[in-house]
Image (cartoon, rainbow, N blue to C red):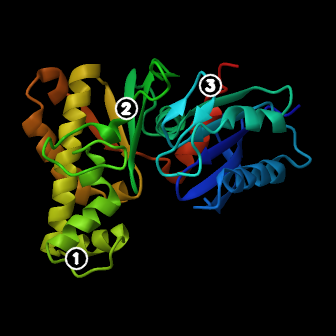
Amino acid sequence: MSENVLAIDIGGTKIAAGLVDPGGALLTSQQRPTPRGAGAEAVWAVVADLVAELTAGVGVRGAGVVSAGPVQLQAGTVSPINVPDWRDFPLRDRVAELLPGRPVRLAGDGVAMALGEHWRGAGQGAGFLLGMVVSTGIGGGLVLDGQPYPGRTGNAGHVGHVVVDTAGGPCACGGHGCVETIAAGPSMVAWAKTQGWSGPAGDARALAAAAADGDPIARSAFARSGTALAAMIASVAAVCDLDLVVVGGGVAKAGELLFEPLHAALARYAGLEFIAELEVIPAELGGEAGLIGAAALLRTD
């Protein structure tokens, strides 16, 4: 039996799967668009097809499966906000049926990103790490002493839904004023459009390009996002006494357009010494972090 691990990463935009070796190297991967509005089994069919394709003629010792949340670890189910066709979907057991006799471990995608960065990326050696993805949404996960910190239900580190604006607008989670409503890519673009930005709706990459070219509204959108993220990070750090925050995702690819206002705002919000000392740095693994982190779920098996 091969020592390689099957890794599966399910999000609202795409479903990815790959094979990861014992050292954390991603050997091969495939991805497909996530079906929308076609029903739970249509989404599952994509997962099953990827599993069949990657394991055809190849042995694996188990699978690490991660999904957008919320997740319920004890039940092995997922109800991703951005995959509305899945509610209490028994993801762990369905994958286990395809891999009889082999362990299947489930986690949220934010936890996987944090684990991946801790194992092979920017977070190596951190005692208490917050890994964050700033993209279409904002996800996060915690790694404590090299192990995922799941919390009671498996959703610890769900930092996109920390409230940073008590008078803020509604969020897809059902709350109001979450950092995701300000700092996620679509939220940034929507705000910029209200300020008169003439770029394409919903296109955060175009917004980043405009900001890089000096467009004042686009730059303000990134400043607003960085400030909201800093407020959230300061709050989480005050509770958790973190060692390191690693930030990845499509919005974070804008580099200093995001990190410069984030660091400046964090310096204002971090009144306590142990928060002021906190490092916030870019992630290193890019899109591979979720799959590498999914495989890391089996490192202790």
Q: Which mark is residue 213?
A: 1
Mark 2 burial class by Cα count in 10 Å: few <14, some 14-19, many 20+: many
Q: Residue furthest bottom?
A: 198
Q: List the residue tagged with mark 3.
A: 75
Q: Residue at x 65, y 24 (%)?
A: 299
Task: Please give left or right for residue 183 compared with residue 16 in the image.
Answer: left
Query: At which x and y percent is residue 291?
Result: 61, 44
Kind of residue at disc 2: Leu
Residue 22 in view (yes/no) = no
Secondary structure of residue under mark 2: strand
Sequence order check, earlier mark of 1 and 3: 3
Q: Residue at x 70, y 57 (%)?
A: 42
Real-space CA distance between mark 2 and mark 3, rounded to the nearest whole angstrom:
25 Å
Secondary structure of residue under mark 3: loop
Query: At which x and y percent is residue 102?
Result: 81, 27
Sequence order check, earlier mark of 2 and 1: 2
Classify residue 31 by image quadrant.
bottom right
Mark 3 burial class by Cα count in 10 Å: few <14, some 14-19, many 20+: some
Sequence order check, earlier mark of 2 and 3: 3
Real-space CA distance between mark 2 and mark 1, rounded to the nearest whole angstrom:
31 Å
Classify residue 139 by image quadrant.
top left
Q: Which mark is residue 130?
A: 2
Task: Please give left or right for residue 232 compared with residue 157 in the image.
Answer: left
Number of marks in the rendered image: 3
Q: Residue at x 71, y 52 (%)?
A: 41
Secondary structure of residue under mark 1: loop
Question: Of residues 239 and 145, which is closer to you in this image?
Answer: 239
Residue 49 in view (yes/no) = yes
